[in-house]
């Protein structure tokens, strides 16, 4: 949409705010409402807005579908990796207590890492879905 | 060692994203195969531990049982995990050549990732002792099944996958509603805790509603007779390796969930004493056994034929469940295991056929007995097992089912079982007759399937014979499991 100046300017202002809000929801998740899933969806919506306004080609320059696939898989690996780490440190699966020197820090560290994994997978899957849908639409138009 | 209970789910779950990250080619398959062999090894060790230590319990994240998620393993689920391990360990090596022919190259990593997720989901359903966790893993396995079925070569795979998606989602949602209603009454999701708290509120109408939702939801997923319509197309149009994997495992796991809910959580007195569930399940399973077998006879496609036969075989299992006796449950659990062996072998034999012919229409298979002798011999052996000929596993489980029916004096059931077996003779014979006694019309002679496909198929065929002769392992474990399930309900 090259002609819609207002949309483009507003989007440019909004996208950083959306990303910032996503980070807030992400890292405030262990204290208040929020968490990895919600933050991931909000983060993805920033990319989707970018795609709607500037077109798929521009968005793909920032994150390619390949990168999204890798990030999505990495999110799951981070989640499971925390569980494996707690196994290796002598605890049970996903027992965060053993991750740091004292249990409270361990719980903080564990839940933070896991929520990062969730956010990564959720946001990259959402954006990847949009990419695939847009590609289908374009293929149908041509 | 105590971590094995969670590792058996974790290994396939972790190898799924790793498969997706690997470049297409040999590596994703290699990882998936190693993971499934590891699963089989862990399932064997776990069964041994259950035998020596009794029921095992594992608290995830070290949160104590009624609040945290507990993994609980006794004979019944250890047996189902062993079944899953055996089938996965055989199907994965088979998948390589078959998937390379049937799928685009860039889809391979995703294909193995989805197969691993399916395995992880099914193992998770059996591993967990938490009713809501069952739902989560049910969705993990179902979502991966939908994608796997949609990968089929035939475009009809898409519609059959979509139909399964709708029906499967309805089933899973009903299951979730049922679990939610139970939670609203008892305030707990742990299976053992639910079993303790439910008798106090058993007269509550909410419990009855919950049971209705649960049973209908589970029966949709296990394809009991009137709720089976999604199954034939889903099995028929999926890629060969997926048909073998899904047909051999997913409905069996849902039969396990049915047994777990009716016997362990709701208890025998409630689900069969207060509610007429035994009668309902018995009538539906007998109708399913007979009609699905009859419909199978007229199927033009061999994979669809086997799919209808699966609906009939699910009838045998649910019939065993509905007899509410130690023998009946033993028969149901045995048939779960044995049916996985025979359907796995049969669908893999058809995978070999489809590898050379590009399809599995019965009419295409003329003269195959001569040109693909090993493949068709495997099909015949699997078919004999399906019919229930002595010296095969099919005979063992039908024998126990007949014994269980006779124990309660249900003569008509014995007649129904025999009649359904006779129908099985007819539909297996149809394929055999075309393959062996009708000369090939086309000029091009099909070569025998490659060893990479034949070897896994024959391993399962030989397992059919082995477990049909040496029944110490299967019958022993099934009897122990049945005794434990009935004991838990009292």
Image (cartoon, coloured by chain):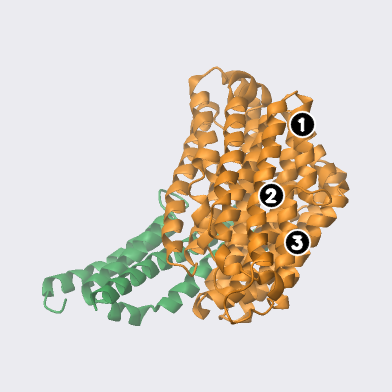
Chain colours: A green, B orange
The residue tagged with tag 3: helix, strand or loop?
Answer: helix
Q: Residue at x 60, y 39 (%)?
A: B290
Nearer the observer, B451 or B369: B369
Residue B472 is situated, as x and y percent measured from the top left of the image, at 88, 47
Residue B402 is situated, as x and y percent measured from the top left of the image, at 76, 34
| Disc 3: which residue | B460
Left or right for A132, reference B317: left
Q: Are marks 3 and 2 on the same chain?
A: yes
Q: Chain of mark 1?
A: B
Q: Earlier in the sequence, mark 3 or mark 2?
A: 2
Residue B480 is situated, as x and y percent measured from the top left of the image, at 82, 38
Nearer the observer, A42 or B330: B330
Reply above or below: B373 against B231: below
Q: Nearer the viewer, mark 3 or mark 2?
A: 2
Q: Earlier in the sequence, mark 2 or mark 1?
A: 1
Q: Nearer the viewer, mark 2 or mark 1?
A: 2
The residue tagged with tag 1: helix, strand or loop?
Answer: helix
Left or right for B163, reference B39: left
Q: Are marks 3 and 1 on the same chain?
A: yes
Residues at marks 3 and 2, CA–CA distance in whole angstroms: 21 Å
The residue tagged with tag 2: helix, strand or loop?
Answer: helix
Crowd around label 3: few <14 · some 14–19 · many ≥20 (10 Å): many
Left or right for B354, reference B176: right
> What is the number of the mark on residue B404?
1
| Disc 2: which residue | B425
């Amino acid at each position: 949409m090259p002609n819609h100046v207002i949309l483009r300017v507003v989007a440019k202002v909004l996208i950083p705010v959306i990303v910032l809000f996503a980070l807030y929801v992400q890292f405030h998740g262990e204290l208040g409402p929020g968490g990895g899933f919600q933050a991931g969806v909000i983060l993805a919506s920033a990319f989707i807005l970018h795609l709607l306004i500037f077109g798929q080609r521009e968005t793909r320059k920032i994150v390619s579908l390949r990168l999204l696939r890798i990030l999505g898989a990495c999110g799951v690996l981070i989640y499971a990796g925390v569980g494996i780490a707690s196994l290796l440190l002598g605890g049970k699966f996903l027992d965060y207590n053993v991750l740091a020197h004292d249990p409270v820090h361990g719980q903080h560290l564990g839940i933070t890492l896991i929520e990062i994994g969730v956010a990564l997978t959720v946001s990259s899957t959402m954006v990847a879905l949009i990419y695939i849908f847009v590609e289908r639409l374009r293929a149908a138009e041509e | 060692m105590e971590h094995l209970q969670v590792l058996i789910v974790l290994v396939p779950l972790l190898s799924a994203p790793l498969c997706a990250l690997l470049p297409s080619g040999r590596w994703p398959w290699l990882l998936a195969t190693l993971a499934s062999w590891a699963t089989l090894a862990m399932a064997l060790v776990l069964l041994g531990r259950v035998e020596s230590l009794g029921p095992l319990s594992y608290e995830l994240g070290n949160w104590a049982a009624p609040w945290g998620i507990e993994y609980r393993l006794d004979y019944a689920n250890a047996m189902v995990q062993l079944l899953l391990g055996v089938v996965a360990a055989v199907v994965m090596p088979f998948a390589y050549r078959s998937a390379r022919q049937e799928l685009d190259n860039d889809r391979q990593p995703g294909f193995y990732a989805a197969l691993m997720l399916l395995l992880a989901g099914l193992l998770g359903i059996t591993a967990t002792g938490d009713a809501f966790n069952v739902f989560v893993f049910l969705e993990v396995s179902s979502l991966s099944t939908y994608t796997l079925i949609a990968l089929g070569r035939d475009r009809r795979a898409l519609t059959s996958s979509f139909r399964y998606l709708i029906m499967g989602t309805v089933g899973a949602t009903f299951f979730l509603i049922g679990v939610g209603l139970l939670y609203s009454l008892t305030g707990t999701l742990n299976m053992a805790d639910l079993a303790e708290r439910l008798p106090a509120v058993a007269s509550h109408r909410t419990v009855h509603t919950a049971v209705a939702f649960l049973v209908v939801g589970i029966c949709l997923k296990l394809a009991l007779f009137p709720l089976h319509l999604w199954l034939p197309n889903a099995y028929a149009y999926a890629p060969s390796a997926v048909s073998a994997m899904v047909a051999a495992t997913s409905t069996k796991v849902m039969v396990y969930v049915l047994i777990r809910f009716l016997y362990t959580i709701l208890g025998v007195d409630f689900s069969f004493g207060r509610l007429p569930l035994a009668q309902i399940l018995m009538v539906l399973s007998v109708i399913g056994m007979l009609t699905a077998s009859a419909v199978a006879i007229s199927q033009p496609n061999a994979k669809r034929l086997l799919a209808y036969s699966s609906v009939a075989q699910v009838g045998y299992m649910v019939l065993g469940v509905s007899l509410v006796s130690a023998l009946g449950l033993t028969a149901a659990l045995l048939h779960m295991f044995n049916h996985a062996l025979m359907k796995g072998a049969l669908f893999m034999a058809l995978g070999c056929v489809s590898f050379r012919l590009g399809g599995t229409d019965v009419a295409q298979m003329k003269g195959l007995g001569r040109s693909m002798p090993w493949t068709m011999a495997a099909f015949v052996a699997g078919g004999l097992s399906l019919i229930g000929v002595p010296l095969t596993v099919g005979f063992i489980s039908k024998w126990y089912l007949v014994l269980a029916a006779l124990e309660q004096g249900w003569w008509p059931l014995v007649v129904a079982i025999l009649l359904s077996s006779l129908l099985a003779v007819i539909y297996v014979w149809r394929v055999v007759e075309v393959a062996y006694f009708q000369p090939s019309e086309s000029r091009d002679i099909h070569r025998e399937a490659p060893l990479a496909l034949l070897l896994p198929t024959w391993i399962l065929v030989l397992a059919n014979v082995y477990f049909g002769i040496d029944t110490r392992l299967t019958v022993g474990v099934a009897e122990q499991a049945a005794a434990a399930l009935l004991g838990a309900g009292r």
